Amino acid sequence: MLNPPVSDHGLPRELGVYVHFPWCLKKCPYCDFLSVARDRRSLPHEAYADVVIAELERRAQSLRNVRLLSVFFGGGTPSLWEPSALGRVLSRIRALFPAGSDEVEVTVECNPTSFDVERGRALQAVGVNRVSIGVQGLDQARLQFLGRLHDVDSGLAAVRDALKSGLPRVSADFIFGVSGQAADAASREARIMSELGTSHLSAYALTIEPGTQFGALARKGKLPLLDEAAVADSFLAVEATLEQAGFEHYEVSNYARNGERSRHNVGYWVGRDYLGLGCGAWGTLSQGGLRHRYRNTPSPERYLAAASSFAHANLSELGPLVASYESITGETALAERIMLGLRLAEGVDLERAAADLGTPLWTRDRARARDRLLGQGKLTLAGGVATIPKRHWLFADGIIADLM
Ligand code: SF4
C-alpha cells in the first residue's frame, strides 16, 4: 500500500480524476468516444478495477500537493460496471488524495439500459453523489436513427429512478439538431426534460465525427442532415425553453439550476489538472512547473494485461501502456485556455491566463483575429476577460479557431 502524496510547498493544486470504462452494450453510429461493444455477462468487473487501481497507485507516486475536487467515471458505459468494483476504485482514489472542506463531486455516466433505482442506491452506497443519464431523445424514430438501445419511456424512467434513488444530484443529456427535428420539437423535448426535476441538463447538437459510422455515411452523402441554420434555430429554442424553466446556460452545451454546475467539467474549461485513469483515458498534469498530457492505450486487452506492469512502467515514455505523451508549452496551454474558457458564460481572463503561463498574449496574428472578431460582434473584451456573446455560441468552435 502506498502512502498518500505529501505536500511539497505552497497551496495544494486542485485535482480532478477521470476514470474511463471502455465498454458499451452496442456502439452508437454517431459516437467517437473510446467504446467497444461487449456482452453484459462477459464484462471483467473486478479485473478492470484491479488494473485501474494499479495504475492509480503508480501515477499517485508522482503527484504531490494536490487537493481532490472531483471524480468522474465516464465511458463507454460505466453504469455497466458493478458498483462494488467501481466503489473499490473510488475508495482508493479517496484514500490517496486529500480533499478540501467541500464535498468531492463523484459522477457516474449512466445509460438507461443499465440503470434503475437499485443501481442508483448501490452507487450512492459506494460514495457516488451525482449521475448523468444519457436520455438522448424523446422521439422513438429519432432514438432509433441514433442507434440507441433504449426507448423514450426507459430514458425518462432512468431519470425518475435516479431521483427516486435519493442521489443528491442528477443530470440528463439529450441531443438536438437531428434530421427531421424542427426547432419546436427540440423545444418540446427541452421542456419535458426541464420538468423531470434534475438540477443539471446537457443539450448537445448532433455533430458528425469523421471516424464514426455516421461520418462514413455522410462522406458518401447517405446521411440525412439538418442544415446549419435549422440547428441554430433549435439551439436558440432549447436555450429559451431551459432558461425560462430556471436553468442557467453556463457553457455552450450545459445548463444548471441553483448553481449546480458540473464541477468536474468546469475543471476542464478552466484548465485544472486532471488525472486520467483507465483504458484510453487522457490526463493532463503539472509537475515541477511543467505541464504534460498523456493517453493510455486504447486497447482494452492490452490495458487489462497490464496489471502487473504498472508498478514498474515508465509512464513518461510511449510504451505498451502509454499511447501518447507530450509536454505542453506555455503557448499551447494558453491556446487551450482560450479554446476551453470561451465555452463558458463568464469567458476567460486572457491577461491573467497569459501571465500565469508566462507567455505573450497578443501575438500579431491573435491581435488581428481579436480585432476582426470584436468588429463582427462575435467577441467581447472587458478588462482582460473575453467572452463570446450567447447568440454566437453555437459557432463558438469557429470563433475560437480564429483566435488560435
Ligand atoms: S452508449 Fe454512449 S459511449 Fe457507448 S457508444 Fe453509445 S454514445 Fe458512445
Image (cartoon, rainbow, N blue to C red):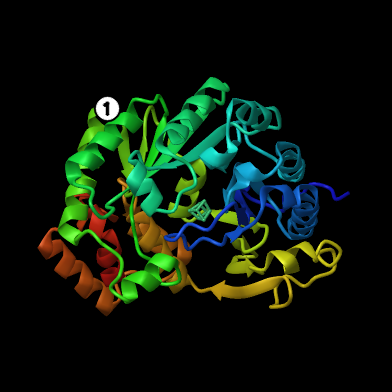
User: What residue is at 47 percent from the left and 25 percent from the top?
Assistant: 160
Give the x, y percent position of residue 167.
56, 26
Question: Which residue ends up furthest to the left in the rendered image?
Answer: 375
Going by the image, does 78 lie left or right of 133?
right
At 72% across and 48% down in the image, what residue appears? 41
- Would you say 24 lies left or right of 4 here? left
Q: Name the amino acid, label 1.
A: Ala
On the question of residue 327 being in view, the answer is yes
State the residue at coordinates (67%, 68%): 299
Splitting the image into 4 quarters, where does residue 68 fall?
Answer: top right
Q: Nearer the viewer, residue 318 or 95?
A: 318
How far from the left and from the top, in percent, is residue 261? 43, 37
How packed mark 1 is, by other alpha carbons closer than 10 Å (few <14, some 14-19, many 20 or more), is some
Q: Is residue 239 visible?
A: no
Q: In which quadrant is the C terminus drawn?
A: bottom left
Rendered view: 200 above or below 229: above
Q: Which residue is mark 1?
A: 245
Position of residue 287 relative to residue 79, above or below, is below
Judged left or right of residue 29, residue 351 is: left
